[in-house]
Amino acid sequence: MIPNKYLGIGYKVLAVLLLLYAVVYGMLAQLPELPTLGQSSRNIFYHVPLWFVTLTMAGISLAYSLKYLRLTDPDAPRSGNPLLADARAREAAQLSALFISLGLATGIIWQRVTWGADMHSGELTAWWAWDPVQVCALIALLIYLAYFLLRSSFAEPEQRARIAAVYNIFAFATLIPLFFIIPKMLPGLHPTAEKGSFIFNKSDISNEFRLILYPGMLGFVLLGIWIFELRSRLAIAALKVEELLADKLYQTTSNG
Amino acid sequence: MTTLLHTFFLLQEEKSWLMQSDKVYSVLAVLLIVFGTLIVYLYFTNRKLKKVEEKISELEK
């Protein structure tokens, strides 16, 4: 049995090593020449993993929202702080939104040199092609931004947490058609259009790319988990401040 | 907006800097966006964490 302390350090070391490998080898490796893409094909090592982190964070957020609902169920035994589960769901959702934004921004840069290569920089379609995958990702971002808007409209923590948890289930459910169904149904510029993910398809991606892409993907996912762990610690500390303030207020009123 | 895009992404010639050297600068731009954003995000998280920890020690006194 590996102690938790070593596991906690081990995955961080692994994340750093895998990311270093993906960045250094991804930039220096001799890769097959691809028409239109040129050297920009290396973007696959840094753009694609962002979507895997997005899905991981959205999954973690969903898990904590479900945990919150289970902990607040009057028929279920209470074993934990429901507000902590809600805070963790919020932090993971925030990271999901961050990684969607990064995926969109990096996609815009990549599209400028490929699909928009012959266009003038002043044209909007040189930067944004209204490709179904792009549009679906933008909708996913708006759905997660609405989650934060919804949270900010409730002052009472328990009411806010309950409604946000229910909305989060809906938000995660929308990711399935947005990322996996609609892009396959519509014609588009992404290689995934009508065909599905090519990342795991042996005939569509060469071994030279897979050798860097897969470790890079794992590295990015581990980095996402690392950041989530940090944000969780912040959420725990913030809850402790609230508890201490409430205690202080109680002491002041009972003394007065 | 158009002028801004011209200033940042278009040189006097027709080719954007992103297209030069067989489009390798687009990879550098992507790396900069990803790691730059994450570093800034972690910096602000760390700053926030320090503030919260200070508040905890202040309240525990």
Image (tube, helix red, strand yellow):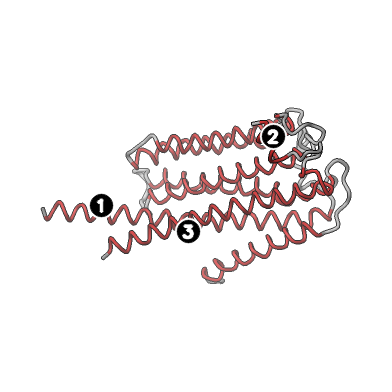
The chain under label 1 reads A
Q: Going 66% across and 52% down the picture, which residue do you hit?
A: B32
Distance of mark 2 from mark 1, alpha carbons?
47 Å
Residue B37 placement, left or right of A20: left
- Pointer 1 residue: A246
Label 2 amino acid? Val
**Residue A153, above or below A88:** above
Q: Kindly state the secondary structure of the residue where label 3 is placed.
A: helix
**Residue B46, above or below B16:** below
Q: Position of residue A203 (x, y in %)?
A: 85, 46
The chain under label 2 reads A
**Badge 3: residue crowd in 10 Å (few <14, some 14–19, many ≥20):** some
Label 1 amino acid? Ala
- Pointer 3 residue: B46
Distance of mark 3 from mark 2, alpha carbons?
34 Å
Label 3 amino acid? Asn
Q: Going 25% across and 52% down the picture, which residue do you hit?
A: A246
Q: Kindly state the secondary structure of the residue where label 1 is placed.
A: helix
**Badge 2: residue crowd in 10 Å (few <14, some 14–19, many ≥20):** many
The reply to whether the C-beta atoms of the residues labelled 3 and 1 are less than 8 Å apart is no
